[in-house]
Image (tube, rainbow, N blue to C red):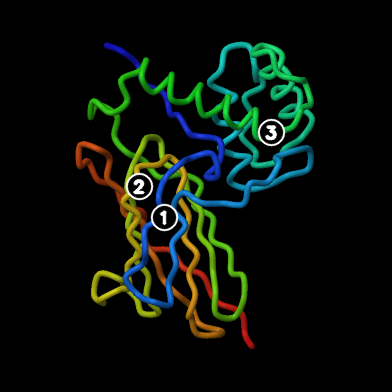
């Protein structure tokens, strides 16, 4: 039986797709959108985690295989190896050309492994909420295969007993995020993430929470 491994694309910004509109006018969604930043030494966060996951799966590139979310010297060394193997300038950071290469390698691997034949269950990883102001928040997460997503949230718990607000992203992606606005200051919000792969196989996180800043 063929073995399957987790594949995670390197960054949200690499993916091409249309941004779906939110049901509520105060809410915007950015399921396949992120600033086109350069990932380099000292960077932290979900994009770095996703990068390390992908480097780990490439032969001879990242033998240490550490998934830390921090772009340190080992990750820099791995990026240089990847660039050397593929005829790119060995700059040691992830800019547009390296992003394009990583996206191509991911798509090739997905095709080779048959991810999309329904045999790999969808899973949710690296959920990272970030409160950005008294009325806004940002949540990022990754999945082990292409999925759509629903982000459900409310200031009441449990969510199952409420009618939560919902942000739907119908774009198939490995990396997802939502920007939420119109929140109340100094308020705890509860949320869950639901995903579906291209065969309709579902997965759902447990209920989580974040608290907005006071005015």
**Residue found at x 54% / y 61%:** 129
Badge 3 density bin: few <14, some 14–19, many ≥20, Cα 10 Å: many
Q: Circle 2 — which element?
A: strand
Badge 1 density bin: few <14, some 14–19, many ≥20, Cα 10 Å: some
Q: Circle 1 — which element?
A: loop
Q: Earlier in the sequence, mark 1 or mark 3?
A: 1
Relative depth, front residue between 46 and 105 = 105
Q: Can you say whether 197 is above or below 169 in the image?
A: above
- Residue 107's disc is none
Residue position marked by numbered label 1 in the rendering = 19
Quadrant position of the N terminus in the picture: top left
Marks 1/3: CA distance? 24 Å
Q: Can you say whether 61 is above or below 11 in the image?
A: above
- Residue 94's disc is 3
- Give left or right: position of 89 versus 177: right
> Percent from the top left, x then y, of residue 138?
53, 63
Marks 2/1: CA distance? 8 Å
Badge 2 density bin: few <14, some 14–19, many ≥20, Cα 10 Å: some
Residue position marked by numbered label 2 in the rendering = 171
Marks 2 and 3: CB-CB under 8 Å?
no
> Percent from the top left, x then y, of residue 101?
58, 24
Q: Can you say whether 99 is above or below 152 in the image?
A: above
Q: Earlier in the sequence, mark 2 or mark 3?
A: 3
**Residue found at x 43% / y 72%:** 27
Relative depth, front residue between 185 and 112 = 112
Quadrant position of the C terminus in the picture: bottom right
- Give left or right: position of 24 versus 200: right
The part of the image, by quadrant, that contains residue 19 is bottom left
């Amino acid at each position: 039986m063929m073995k399957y491994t987790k594949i995670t694309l390197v960054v949200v910004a690499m993916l091409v797709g249309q941004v779906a509109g939110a049901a509520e006018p105060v809410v915007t969604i950015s399921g396949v959108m992120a600033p086109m930043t350069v990932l380099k030494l000292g960077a932290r966060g979900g994009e770095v985690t996703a990068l390390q996951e992908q480097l780990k799966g490439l032969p001879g590139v990242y033998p240490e295989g550490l998934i830390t979310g921090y772009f340190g010297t080992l990750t820099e060394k791995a990026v240089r190896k990847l660039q050397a193997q593929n005829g790119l300038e060995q700059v040691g950071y992830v800019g547009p050309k390296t992003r394009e290469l990583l996206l191509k390698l991911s798509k090739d691997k997905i095709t080779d492994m048959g991810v999309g034949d329904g045999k790999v269950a969808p899973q949710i990883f690296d959920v990272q909420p970030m409160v950005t102001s008294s009325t806004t928040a940002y949540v990022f997460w990754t999945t082990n295969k292409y999925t759509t997503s629903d982000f459900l949230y409310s200031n009441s718990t449990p969510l199952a007993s409420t009618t939560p607000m919902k942000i739907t992203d119908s774009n198939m992606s490995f990396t997802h995020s939502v920007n939420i606005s119109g929140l109340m200051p100094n308020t705890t919000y509860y949320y869950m993430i639901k995903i579906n792969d291209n065969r309709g196989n579902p997965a759902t996180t447990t209920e989580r929470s974040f608290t907005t800043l006071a005015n």
